[in-house]
Amino acid sequence: MTSSVFNSERLLFTPATPQTDAIPVIFAFPNEYTVGITSLGYQVVWATLAMRDDLQVSRLFTDIHEQLPRQPEILGFSMSWELDYVNIFNLLEYLQIPLRAISRTANHPLVFGGGPVLTANPEPFADFFDVILLGDGENLLGDFIDAYKEVRNADKEAQLKKLAYVPGIYIPSLYRIKYSSPDGEILAINPIYSEFPTVIQKQTYRGNTLSVSTAVTEKAAWENIFMVEVVRSCPEMCRFCLASYLTLPFRTASFENSLIPAIEQGLKVTNRLGLLGASVTQHPEFSELLDYISQPKYDDVRLSLASVRTNTVTEKLAATLAKRDTRSLSIAIESGSDKLRQIINKKLYNDEIIQAAVNAKAGGLSSLKLYGMVGIPGEESEDLDATVAVMKAVRKAAPGLRLTLGCSTFVPKSHTPFQWFGVNKQSEKRLQFLQKQLKPQSIDFRPESYNWSIIQALLSRGDRRLSYLLELTRDFGDSLGSYKRAFKELKGKIPDLDYYVYSNWSTDQILPWNHLQGPLPQSTLIKHLAEAMSHFRSASEVK
């Protein structure tokens, strides 16, 4: 079974033949193969490692793996979903490696992690990793391996100290956190030795060749898809949005030198193309890209698009997608309220939402999925009424178009201006209100689990003390009840759930990720926060 899964991959790169003294590496994805191989980030890092002849790379998933080395020197995890920490624990145990970095000896491999979750806020997971790579992997990965080679035969402490000097590499064990009390606020975060940086800067790749699939397989969650990253980050900067703030600046793939050659190469092995990015339609040459894909020679190509910006939905875009076997389009509107969109810096008007639906229908699409959010800071009940009103207006303007409103709860994210806000306790009721209003309108309302949003908020704002909680919840199961039970067990040893999830934090307090620098300094985030709050009805809504 295992070999047939790997044999069905069509590789778009040539793996190197490892040298005799190549470093044995296991590169793991903490989920099943079909999920992991559909992660563009995982594919690219794996290929980057596998193209080096100084490494011998084996892949590991929760269900299958390639032949693993008996004595791996490096074990890496790509983490793109918070709750996958449970699978990281399981895989470490499977490999007979202690969960906590502090318990590992010279006989254990160096355990590193990277990916969006760990770049955003690695602190709840920090005690389980020797090394964390922050930011884009394009240059960082090579810098990490090259630095490791220089200390390959040294003891672990010497290895970690050497790696700590590499920009973008974070060694959690070399940083000490001081608390006012076991369950109190953070007082200070400092390196153990003065020669290490007090602030670690996330790595940013500034090239114009972005990621593309390195393997195509029918076993992927998106069968036989060839993925192309068209843009990275998003220029819109909605105040809650990690995908924009954490990954700035906005970068676009070169049309002539990157996108076209990549698409041509990919379409030789499959007829399914996925264009990825937080704001794909904002590529300056997106229209030319559509024309290119519309050529008769690509008539059998099935095209999938990530979420697109509402006011870029033209009839031409809809028609191109409809012709290329796409029935639906996704747009993020967040709310039907002008006031709320001002608060979050969403440059969008209701008539543009309605026009997008009209264009989608006219171009031949059969459904439109809109994404909304409840619990946005500053939200009041009339803002929910405005969302219901705009959904009704869309349905009226484009009859026959199947409408879905996917709706999440606002979750504070690190490195964004809204990191200081807690989750709104009214959010669950607000989701229920929308459900009740929209169901009779034949609008398919799909709320994201409120309980999952609470867990997400806990992990996105957590500090290192949560590591004890994560070990406990693993035994209890991953429901919200398990987390509450674990908090009860750890009472007095760590702050309570309310502190992490619902509290509005002061802009003066030290945040768990204060020593990890995102693209923008805290002073800029505070300015953006003040700008957002200037649109609040009442200034007393946050400390």
Image (cartoon, helix red, strand yellow):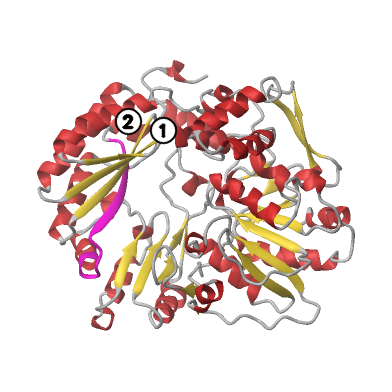
**Circles 1 and 2: CB atoms closer than 8 Å:** yes
Spot the residue most to the front: 1
**Kind of residue indicated by mark 2:** Leu
Disc 1 from disc 2: Cα separation = 8 Å
Task: Indicate left or right for 34 with 205 as reference.
Answer: left
**Residue 429 placement (x, y as % from top left):** 34, 24
Q: Residue at x 42, y 62 (%)?
A: 221
Q: Residues within 10 Å of mark 1 (few under 14, many from 20)?
A: some
Q: Residue at x 75, y 30 (%)?
A: 188
**Kind of residue indicated by mark 1:** Tyr
Q: Which mark is residue 431?
A: 2
416 or 228: nearer the viewer: 228
Residue 96 seen in the current view: yes
Q: Residue at x 84, y 66 (%)?
A: 152
Instruction: Report helix, strand or loop for mark 2.
Output: helix
Q: Which residues are magenta?
A: 321-335
**Residue 327 lies in magenta, yes or no?**
yes
Query: Which residue matches tag 1?
Result: 450
34 or 121: nearer the viewer: 34
Q: Which mark is residue 345?
A: none
**Residue 114 placement (x, y as % from top left):** 63, 55
User: Is residue 64 placed above or below 12 in the rendered structure?
Assistant: above
User: Is residue 254 placed above or below 182 in the rendered structure?
Assistant: below
User: Is residue 6 placed above or below 166 in the rendered structure?
Assistant: below
Task: Indicate left or right for 1 with 19 as reference.
Answer: left
Q: Residue at x 35, y 67 (%)?
A: 285
Mark 1 vs mark 2: which is more N-terminal? 2
265 or 453: nearer the viewer: 453
**Residue 40 lies in magenta, yes or no?**
no
Instruction: Report helix, strand or loop for mark 1.
Output: helix
Q: Name the quadrant containing residue 222.
A: bottom left
How many numbered marks appear?
2
